[in-house]
Image: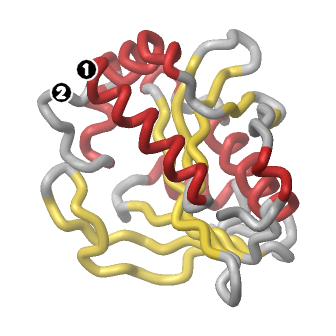
């Protein structure tokens, strides 16, 4: 369970310069399935293999249930990313594997619809989640991992102040293949914009 009284009530929307983040709702299904469906070829190289029912309403209900369960247990918080200027659903970002005690850490994962890429929305979303993790959850460290070929994701993390710490061999099974990942991290007292540029 989260140790903060903040989590005994509904989580408010988080606002950045370009995006608004809020928890997914059951009635987001149509917009979510449309953005994911039209972006499938764009997303598949960077995600776990899609199931045959990936975009079905039944799978959606299970996904929402898992989001709520993770939130209730204090292990993860999923947000949907909405473009401020249009109000449209652009992607998703999750702060997961949240640990307190001596670790005080979490892990960030994200996706964005193809037509919303290249606008700075994800960089803004990662910064908003980092601020939330450090200021509200009082975490000390947040991590993110990305495939070395994913240049866009590397740019997002570095612009959001993350530093590359190393290579995780055969770390996650992405699109059916065990893939190496770069490990990036940001510490609560890192200065803004302190990401690595290799």
Which disc, if any, is residue 125? none
Q: Residues within 10 Å of mark 1 (few under 14, many from 20)?
A: few
Residue, x 55% and y 71% (percent of image)? 184
Residue, x 56% and y 29% (percent of image)? 24
| Cβ atoms under marks 1 and 2 closer than 8 Å | yes
Which disc, if any, is residue 56? 1
SS of the residue under disc 2? loop
Left or right? Give the position of 59 relative to 151. Answer: left
Residue, x 32% and y 32% (percent of image)? 42
x and y percentages locating residue 17 in the rendered image: 83, 32
x and y percentages locating residue 192 in the rendered image: 84, 63
Residue 187 sits in quarter: bottom right
Look at the picture and state if 180 lies above or below 46: below
Can I make out residue 196 in this image? no
SS of the residue under disc 1? loop
Residue 104 sits in quarter: bottom right
Of residue 33 and residue 58, the one placed in the foreground of this image is 58
Q: Residues within 10 Å of mark 2 (few under 14, many from 20)?
A: few
x and y percentages locating residue 198 in the rendered image: 56, 71
x and y percentages locating residue 126 in the rendered image: 67, 49
Left or right? Give the position of 143 relative to 160. Answer: left
Can I make out residue 93 in this image? yes
Which disc, if any, is residue 53? 2
């Amino acid at each position: 369970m989260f140790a903060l009284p903040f989590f005994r009530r509904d989580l408010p929307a988080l606002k950045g310069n370009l995006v608004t983040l809020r928890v997914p709702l059951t009635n987001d299904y149509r917009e979510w399935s449309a953005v994911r469906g039209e972006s499938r070829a764009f997303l598949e190289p960077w995600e776990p293999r899609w199931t045959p029912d990936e975009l079905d309403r039944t799978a959606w209900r299970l996904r929402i249930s898992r989001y709520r369960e993770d939130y209730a247990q204090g292990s993860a918080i999923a947000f949907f990313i909405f473009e401020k200027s249009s109000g449209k659903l652009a992607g998703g970002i999750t702060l997961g594997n949240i640990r307190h005690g001596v670790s005080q850490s979490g892990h960030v994962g994200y996706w964005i619809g193809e037509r919303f890429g290249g606008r700075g929305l994800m960089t803004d979303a990662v910064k908003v989640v980092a601020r939330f993790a450090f200021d509200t959850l009082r975490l000390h460290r947040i991590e993110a991992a990305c495939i070395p070929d994913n240049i866009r994701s590397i740019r997002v993390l570095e612009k959001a102040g993350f530093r590359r710490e190393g290579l995780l061999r055969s770390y996650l099974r992405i699109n059916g293949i065990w893939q190496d990942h770069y490990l990036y991290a940001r510490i609560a007292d890192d200065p803004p914009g302190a990401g690595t540029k290799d």
